[in-house]
């Protein structure tokens, strides 16, 4: 489940409910400077770790080009220790020019920085020397609970990012706004990149989708209409490369319907894409009743798995 809100108390409440309903994981994105920004998802997930016991704590896009690899490896290891081995690390590169400018990072270096950072983090997690000399090497401490390290999934958007994810042999975490048809092509590119680089195709196929479940037909129509408006606004404000990837029809990128309809949609994603994990993002609609959103998540949790 991917929540909304960045208040720690509210996030803890959401995570506790999600765990009680049987959700397997709780996800936070990383974003900077805009309204509702979450610049440090690991810090918020640390608050969640202390209030939960079984639900996995995950990021959709921990942005590696912005970080020093050793400090990032330490932060992830600490969260894995705090949660007793419940971290899933979704990593990304980022795409907003203003963000890279603020961090003084040339955008053309983002993929190289991403890969170098991840490689050094993985080395640190297995106890390799990260400094020192001779008989006095420096090693990461603490190490993660999960060995050799927490699962790493790569958020990818576009052919170059897909090729990089496949080249690393890591699972590809699919975008929440691309159509199923686009995802079919993306997974083909990912499988090809895995094969070309001598990797087995990862078993994990995680996909993010906006999900709303209700038995109220008028409520469903209202949600669909509001999401269509949001998608239109996204297309108008986004760059050309991103705008053309946002489908016109909400049903191409969201699961909206009765429990039966949403269950059938999930089954179709499993059949056509081999989906193993559905990361269900909560609606971000101003003024929409929280009670309806919570009921939607509860109904989704009750669907057969």
Image (cartoon, grey):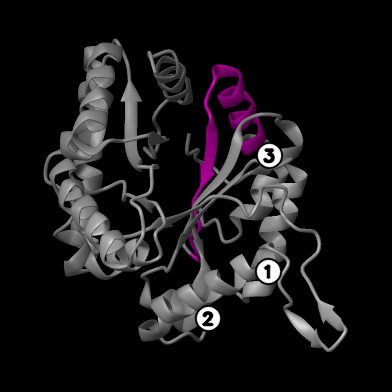
Q: Are marks 2 and 3 in contact (CB under 8 Å)?
A: no
Mark 2 — residue? 103
- In this view, the residue in front, 193 or 281, is 193
For marks 1 and 2, the one nearer the N-term is 2
For marks 3 and 1, the one nearer the N-term is 3
The part of the image, by quadrant, that contains residue 75 is bottom right
Judging from the image, what secondary structure is the residue with disc 1 in? helix
- Picture layout, residue 179 above or below residue 157: above
Q: Residue at x 77, y 45 (%)?
A: 82
Q: Percent from the top left, x then y, of residue 241?
A: 18, 67
- In this view, the residue in front, 72 or 200, is 200
Q: Is residue 13 magenta?
A: yes
- Picture layout, residue 215 above or below residue 134: above
Q: Residue at x 69, y 37 (%)?
A: 9
- Picture layout, residue 115 above or below residue 305: below
Mark 3 — residue? 48
Q: Are marks 1 and 2 in contact (CB under 8 Å)?
A: no
Q: Residue at x 26, y 14 (%)?
A: 258
Judging from the image, what secondary structure is the residue with disc 3 in? helix
The part of the image, by quadrant, that contains residue 22 is top right
Q: Percent from the top left, x then y, of residue 215?
A: 29, 10
- In this view, the residue in front, 216 or 18, is 18
The tag on residue 124 is 1
């Amino acid at each position: 489940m991917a929540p909304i809100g960045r208040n720690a108390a509210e996030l803890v409440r959401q995570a506790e409910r999600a765990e009680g309903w049987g959700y397997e994981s709780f996800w936070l994105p990383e974003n900077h400077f805009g309204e509702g920004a979450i610049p440090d998802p690991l810090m918020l997930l640390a608050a969640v770790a202390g209030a939960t016991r079984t639900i996995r704590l995950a990021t959709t896009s921990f942005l590696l080009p912005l970080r020093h690899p050793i400090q990032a490896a330490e932060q992830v290891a600490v969260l894995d220790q705090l949660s007793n081995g419940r971290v899933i690390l979704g990593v990304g590169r980022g795409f907003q020019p203003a963000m890279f400018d603020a961090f003084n990072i040339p955008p053309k270096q983002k993929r190289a920085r991403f890969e170098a950072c991840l490689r050094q983090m993985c080395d640190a997690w297995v106890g390799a020397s990260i400094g020192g000399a001779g008989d006095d090497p420096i090693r990461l401490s603490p190490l993660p609970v999960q060995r050799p390290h927490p699962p790493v999934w790569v958020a990818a958007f576009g052919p170059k990012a897909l090729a990089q994810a496949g080249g690393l042999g890591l699972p590809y975490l699919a975008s929440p706004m691309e159509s199923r048809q686009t995802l079919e092509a993306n997974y083909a590119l990912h499988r090809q990149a895995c094969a070309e680089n001598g990797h087995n195709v990862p078993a994990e196929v995680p996909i993010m989708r906006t999900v709303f479940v209700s038995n109220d037909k008028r409520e469903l129509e209202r949600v669909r209409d509001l999401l269509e408006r949001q998608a239109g606004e996204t297309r108008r404000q986004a760059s050309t490369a991103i705008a053309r990837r946002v489908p016109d029809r909400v049903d191409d990128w969201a699961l909206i319907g009765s429990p039966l309809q949403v269950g059938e949609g999930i089954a179709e994603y499993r059949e056509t894409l081999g989906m193993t994990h559905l990361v269900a993002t909560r609606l971000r609609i101003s003024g929409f009743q929280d009670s309806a959103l919570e009921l939607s998540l509860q109904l989704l949790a009750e669907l057969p798995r």
